[in-house]
Amino acid sequence: MELNQFMQGLERRNPGQPEFHQAVREFASKVLPFVNEHPQYAKASILERMTEPDRIVIFRVCWEDDEGSVRVNRGWRVQFNNSIGPYKGGLRFDKSVTLSVLKFLGFEQVFKNSLTTLPMGGAKGGSDFNPKDKSDAEVMRFCQSFMTELHLHIGEDTDVPAGDIGVGAREVGYLFGQYKRLRNEFVGAMTGKGLAYGGSLVRTEATGYGAVYMAREMLAKRNESIEGRTCVVSGSGNVAQYAAEKLLELGGKVVTLSDRGGFLHMPGGFTSEQIAAVIDLKTRQRRSLADWAAECGCEHYAGERPWRVPCELAFPCATQNEIEIDDARTLLKNGCQLVSEGANMPTDFDAAMLFEEARILHAPSKAANAGGVAISGLEMTQNSMRLSWTRDEVDQRLQGIMRRIHEQCVEYGSEGDWIDYFKGANVAGFIKVADAMLAYGVL
Ligand code: NDP
Ligand code: 2IT
């Protein structure tokens, strides 16, 4: 089958879902040639089946704000594929959340989770609720209402949600507390939990650290390292914070951070004290970077993304499609050699093509940010065993998993002396899920 023909069918079946179309196009452009060479997959219509979620739950979420007004939001859980393990994937609370966004994220999660080598299927959920301008009490009431429906569809062996944009430690606490109350059981039905109640060490840091470990593996393959390299990081949330922390630890120079209001430029590089201050600013004080610019003594550029700042290594860690074609051109013109995607699908299709033509090192999100869900998988293991591993033990496992993900990319993505990490990650992620689906027959 041919890519455009496959995509026409998918777009017809899923009208008005541009992010989902984009994620499938990127995946199918790399996997279709492999499927065409392996008729067992084509014969079983594996691609058509993989692009159709197992089920989607859509529900009303009502809650009362602090003024006593009744508010209504929409909740979703997209259970995409459980061929290789229970559904697993985060929850996003953001005003930009739509079914298209959650279907793209759920689809990506299937192959990301496969790459981790752990037994986890793929799912994503969330709401168009915006936690930004809400009080703690409002967030709590919303989370309790959301879980009052969601608990019917999840469970430690069924579907295990976690955080994503707008869902951090505070929200996971409220959500898991309500789950525990409604079910009258204490099991690992969510990950990203606090350390006091079943969380894993290093889960908070895992996505950001993992994206940097991936970059380290890619550079090591060329006998290069992070030491002394100038790094541009976007975002200043969970993933960006710990990507920046690890980059500093490995001798990199982090010259930018960003949020919805714009970006900060620190030409000499942020110090580790400043990164710690950003973590406090964003997770405890819930303030914007613009507020903090004067305090940290760096320049703030309102309404702009950081990609025009010259760098060798780029770490997009904010959101989807934050690198468009002009950003990609600027990055390449300024000598960028590596992009490790901390965020999900941060590079749009045309920008990714440009990076491919330039033959730079470009790790797709399903490989580069898999460290987060991998440690979620290890949180599930620890919960089942009713014990917890040390920080060093979890970090060693994370490094091992990122190394193994890199090896899979090399195995399936080598093109002469260049590695097509997009091809490698997509094909390797696909094979495990596809083989499980073949084993089950027609379902
Ligand atoms: P957070 O909510 O902690 O932080 C998100 C950051 O990105 C914030 O700095 C936020 O700005 C910024 N941001 C969000 N939307 C936009 C936008 N439309 N334009 C500009 N900036 C934006 O989320 P995470 O750090 O957890 O998630 C970041 C990315 O990483 C997402 O793509 C997520 O799917 C992905 N990811 C997360 C994992 C995890 O374990 N948390 C695992 C794997 C991937 P502001 O501070 O102003 O809100
Ligand atoms: O996109 C992702 O991989 C996440 N938000 C983490 C999912 C998880 O279950 O830990």
Image: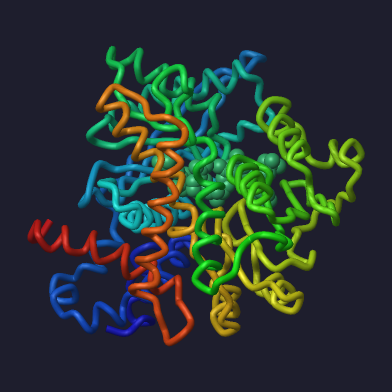
Quarter of the rendering occupied by the C terminus: bottom left
Residue at 41% x, 22% y: name it.
Answer: 176
Q: Position of residue 426 (x, y in %)?
A: 37, 68
Does residue 229 appear in this view? yes
Question: Residue 408: which quarter of the image?
Answer: bottom left
Left or right: where does residue 97 sit relative to residue 411? Answer: right
Residue at 39% x, 44% y: name it.
Answer: 397
Q: Position of residue 221 (x, y in %)?
A: 49, 71
Quarter of the displayed picture in which ligand 1 can be seen: top right
Residue at 25% x, 27% y: name it.
Answer: 384
Q: Position of residue 113 (x, y in %)?
A: 34, 51
344 shown above or below 423: above
204 shown above or below 36: above
Q: Nearer the viewer, residue 439 or 335?
A: 335
Does residue 95 appear in this view? no
Quarter of the rendering occupied by the N terminus: bottom left
Left or right: where does residue 52 sit relative to residue 205? Answer: left
